[in-house]
Image: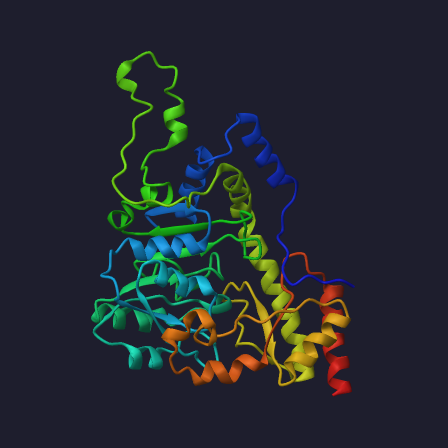
Amino acid sequence: MNIRLFKPDIGQEELEEIKDSFDQSWIGLGPKVSEFEVRWSKFIGCEESIAVNSATAALHLALRCFNFPKGSKVLVPTMTFSATASAVLYNDLIPVFIDSNEITLGMDLDDLKRKYDKDCVAVIPVHYSGHPIEMDILVPWARSKNLAIIEDCAHTVGGMYKGKNLGTWGDIGCFSFEEKKCMTTGDGGMICSNNKDLLKDVRAYRWVGIDKDNWKSAKSYTQKDKDAMHWFYELKVLGYKYNMNDLAASIGLVQLKKVVKMNSKRSKIIVDYMRGLRELEIETLLPFEPNKYVYQMFGIRHNYKDDLIIFLKSKGISTGCHYTPLHMQPLFRDFKGTCPVSEKIYPTMITLPLHVGLTSDEIDYIILSLKEFKNLS
């Protein structure tokens, strides 16, 4: 077998929607991006959504919205993808790395409180793998400290915590539609909020400083009224080339219709995994609750990590490790803090295949391979 670690669930429906964009001869920032934004807002239950080309861009712009003084501190988990902390550096801010909760691998709230000081201006909780941070505890604490709350929801789409959609607990929610995520646009992201004023400059930030829909102005090219002013725009802010395009949005519109069903399939796969691992007495990466939350990743903890990864590779089973704690990376050496739990758990972490196309036979084969390795050890 050759079992991929991640694989997007895409097909004819997505191709038909892309063909429609081809037929309209509009494949840049256009009407489908706007439609995707409206549908996303309805799906997630927020007032405003703005599509960008990645969650990295979303995180960058989310911090940009606040115009924090240079050198201010932002509290981020060490166990996350680089974008969470890179976005802090993009804004000339200082990342303060928070250790992991030993059980969930999410941001440890006790360590968060210990590392807070008066120079901190924001906190970026990451729902690691899709397992929610205890937002009912974090939010009131952060509010009491006047901290901005930016939710990094890259690992979940449609996940909820205590009856409230993840991504709507804080000031701004950031989502990823990269090909490995719960739903995809190829590459892409979304920034959303219930505070429209907070996002008032984001449309300009994402498109080189221009707050104007080019596809709308194109409709006025042939108007004979000199007041149409289709060509006119102003630059009021320093912008970036972060916009989503209609090809990506075409995929997103179809994926959004399928995401609840895809989430359900992922949950079933995790249930099957957990049943097989229980018999082998192998510890899961975190206490997965697939009937309650939406997960992008699944994995285990194993004391013979390297040997097991090589063994599974020999069986045609792809694996990964999410992640090397950021405070251990050379890029963030100057900001290195003390995160002993993450350092202890990292050498045991293995990500196993999880995607909608994973079959029952493939899951059985992975479990059988884990059993075979256990018998060899």
Question: What residue is drawn where x is 69% and y is 79%?
Answer: 308
Q: Residue furthest bottom?
A: 377
Residue 103, x across and y down, in percent: 48, 81
Callout count: 0
- Please identify the quarter of the rendering in which residue 92 is found: bottom left
Q: Residue furthest top?
A: 224
Query: Which is more toward the observer, 140 or 22?
Result: 22
Question: What residue is drawn where x is 32% and y is 73%?
Answer: 137
Q: Is residue 364 left or right of residue 267?
A: right
Location of the C terminus (image quadrant): bottom right
Residue 246, x across and y down, in percent: 49, 37
Location of the N terminus (image quadrant): bottom right
Residue 375 vs 261, above or below: the answer is: below
> How are the colours assigned in the image?
rainbow
Residue 220 vs 365, above or below: the answer is: above
- Please identify the quarter of the rendering in which residue 327 is found: bottom left
Question: What residue is drawn where x is 40% and y is 65%?
Answer: 85
Residue 317, x across and y down, in percent: 72, 68
Q: Is residue 32 left or right of residue 334?
A: right
Q: Is residue 345 left or right of residue 305?
A: left
Residue 171, x across and y down, in percent: 30, 58
Residue 287 vs 179, above or below: the answer is: below
